[in-house]
Image (tube, grey):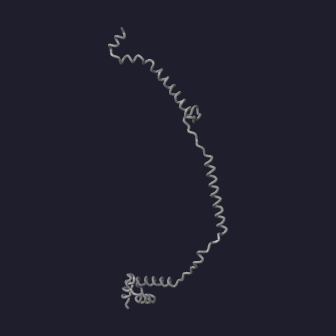
């Protein structure tokens, strides 16, 4: 066969159109091929890799997979240390949860002292409002005569007489 025919045979091989006899012919040709055609050289490497893989044997002992492994000393130590660490985390978290108490709600500060009783805070607020309203009442005492400005003039004359 001419190299051109082997290129065509190789294309047919890649397309899956060759028979077993054609593949064996192509394989034997590529084993002894020494040319410079890059497609044929690539195919030669491919067939060489397939032949090498075909000759490999896989030595698997399935009984070995099902045997229980004996834990090593390091593995035992890691399991032991992991369980100690987990227990320590649990103890510390329980201790923390028991120590945490609800902080009291602070409603007001009187002279720098926090007031956490709601009723006492309400009483202090009422007292502060009374003190504030007394100061407002003092400022409005002089405005009591202003109410007469809103009355009609006829009423004012009857009031003067």
Disc count in the image? 0
Answer with the quarter of the image where residue 37 lies: bottom left
**Drawn side of residue 42 relative to residue 131, left or right:** left
Which residue is at the far top?
Answer: 161
Specify whether residue 122 is in view. Answer: yes
Quadrant of the drawing holding the C terminus: top left
Identified at 63% across, 72% down, the residue is: 69
Query: Residue 133 placed where, x, y %?
Result: 48, 24
**Drawn side of residue 9 relative to residue 75, left or right:** left
Identified at 38% across, 91% down, the residue is: 1
Query: Residue 113 placed where, x, y %?
Result: 59, 34
Query: Residue 140 placed where, x, y %?
Result: 45, 20
**Drawn side of residue 82 relative to residue 39, left or right:** right
- Of residues 4 and 24, the one nearer the viewer is 24
- Of residues 14 and 148, the one nearer the viewer is 148
Query: Residue 115 placed where, x, y %?
Result: 57, 34
Specify whether residue 34 is in view. Answer: no
Identified at 61% across, 48% down, the residue is: 97
Identified at 59% across, 78% down, the residue is: 63
101 shown above or below 57 = above
């Amino acid at each position: 066969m001419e190299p051109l025919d082997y290129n065509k045979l190789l294309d047919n091989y890649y397309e899956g159109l060759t028979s077993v006899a054609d593949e064996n012919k192509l394989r034997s040709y590529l084993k002894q091929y020494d040319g410079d055609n890059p497609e044929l050289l690539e195919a030669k490497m491919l067939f060489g890799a397939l032949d090498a893989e075909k000759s490999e044997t896989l030595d698997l002992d399935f009984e070995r997979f099902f045997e229980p492994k004996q834990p090593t000393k390091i593995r035992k130590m890691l399991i032991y240390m992991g369980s100690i660490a987990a227990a320590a985390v649990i103890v510390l978290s329980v201790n923390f949860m028991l120590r945490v108490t609800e902080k009291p709600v602070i409603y007001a500060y009187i002279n720098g002292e926090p007031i956490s009783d709601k009723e006492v805070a309400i009483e202090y607020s009422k007292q502060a409002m009374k003190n504030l309203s007394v100061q407002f009442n003092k400022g409005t005492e002089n405005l009591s005569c202003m109410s007469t400005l809103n009355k009609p003039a006829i009423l004012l004359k009857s009031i003067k007489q």
